């Protein structure tokens, strides 16, 4: 599929033979779930959000979009989670 930076309608030509809608719907469901988890973790949707998309092959893709402070907050949360998991041995 290539690099995720290449995913999107500007990176390839739409094909009439590909079902993009079902892939996008699945991506939207996953993005909604991820956005709920991001909000539950205390991240503001204006700073970090999951964005549904679709690849050239019709498969759903979820992109993570963040401003710089939001990206730093997410990195801190993930680092804390990783550190806590290692301490617990999980």
Image (cartoon, rainbow, N blue to C red):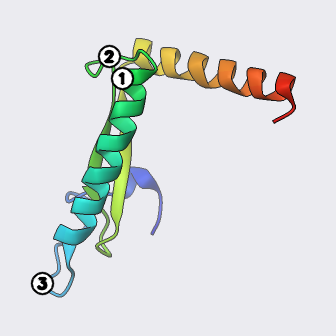
Q: Secondary structure at mark 1?
A: helix
The residue carrying pointer 3 sits among few (fewer than 14), some (14 to 19) or many (20 or more) residues within 10 Å by Cα, namely few
The percent position of residue 18, horizontal first and vertical second, equals 21, 82
Q: Which quarter of the figure has residue 12? A: bottom left
Task: Specify the quadrant of the image occupied by residue 31.
Answer: top left
Residue annotated with mark 1: 39
Q: CA distance from mark 1 to mark 2?
A: 6 Å
* Foreground tag (3 vs 2): 2
1 or 2: tag closer to the N-terminus: 1
Up-down relation of residue 21 to residue 31 (above or below): below
Task: Kindly identify which residue carries mark 2.
Answer: 44
Mark 1 touching mark 2, by CB under 8 A?
Answer: yes
- Label 3 close to label 2 by CB (< 8 Å): no
Residue hosting label 3 = 16
Residue 79 placement, left or right of 43? right
Query: In the rendered structure, which disc, 3 or 2, sits on the residue that comes first in sequence?
Result: 3
Q: In percent of the image, x 29 and y 61: which residue is there? A: 26
Q: CA distance from mark 3 to mark 2?
A: 37 Å
Q: Secondary structure at mark 3?
A: loop
């Amino acid at each position: 599929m290539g690099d995720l930076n290449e995913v999107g309608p500007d990176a390839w030509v739409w094909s009439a033979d590909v079902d993009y809608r079902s892939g996008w719907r699945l991506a939207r469901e996953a993005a909604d779930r991820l956005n709920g988890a991001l909000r539950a973790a205390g991240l503001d949707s204006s700073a970090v959000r999951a964005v549904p998309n679709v690849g050239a092959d019709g498969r759903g893709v979820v992109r993570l979009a963040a401003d710089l402070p939001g990206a730093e907050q997410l990195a801190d949360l993930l680092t804390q989670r990783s550190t806590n998991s290692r301490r617990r041995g999980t």
